[in-house]
Image (cartoon, rainbow, N blue to C red):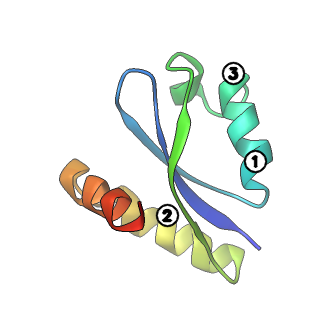
Amino acid sequence: MPYVYILRCADGTLYTGYALDLEQRWAAHNGGRGARYTAGRRPVSIVYSEQLPSISDALKREHAIKRLTRSGKEALIARQG
């Protein structure tokens, strides 16, 4: 089942993505192979994740999260934590 996740980069910025295997994707980000954005901002940590029933749902949720302001993302992270 796919996941939507938010990473906190070493410089404090947030990155949102989706993955089928969250641990493998996190390792890829920290290995410099995950995304160009995170490659120069390592290490990254997972601060939010949400499992969804389908890839389509995950992509829709990822898009919705990306449209949030930074404060909205921080509130989402705080609610889960």
Query: Which of labels 1 and 3 is toward the front?
Result: 1
Cα separation between marks 1 and 3:
14 Å
Q: Earlier in the sequence, mark 3 or mark 2?
A: 3
Question: Is residue 43 depicted above or below 52 in this figure?
Answer: above
Badge number at residue 65: none
Cα separation between marks 3 and 2:
21 Å
Q: Residue at x 73, y 27 (%)?
A: 33
Residue under pointer 3: 32
Q: Determine whether, in the image, residue 69 is placed left or right of residue 24.
A: left
Q: Return the x and y of residue 54 as percentages of the image width and height.
A: 70, 80
Q: Return the x and y of residue 38 as percentages of the image width and height.
A: 54, 28
The quarter of the picture where the C terminus appears is: bottom left
Question: Is residue 72 depicted above or below 54 in this figure?
Answer: above
The amino acid sitting under disc 2 is Glu
Q: Earlier in the sequence, mark 2 or mark 1?
A: 1
Residue under pointer 1: 23
Q: Residue at x 49, y 20 (%)?
A: 41
Q: Residue at x 23, y 60 (%)?
A: 72
SS at badge 3? loop
Residue under pointer 2: 62
Query: Which of labels 2 and 1 is toward the front?
Result: 1
The amino acid sitting under disc 1 is Glu
Of all residues shown, which one is farthest toward the bottom?
A: 53
Q: Return the x and y of residue 1 as percentages of the image width and height.
A: 77, 74
To which quarter of the image does residue 8 belong? top left
The amino acid sitting under disc 3 is Gly
Q: Residue at x 28, y 53 (%)?
A: 74
* Foreground of the two, 46 or 14: 46
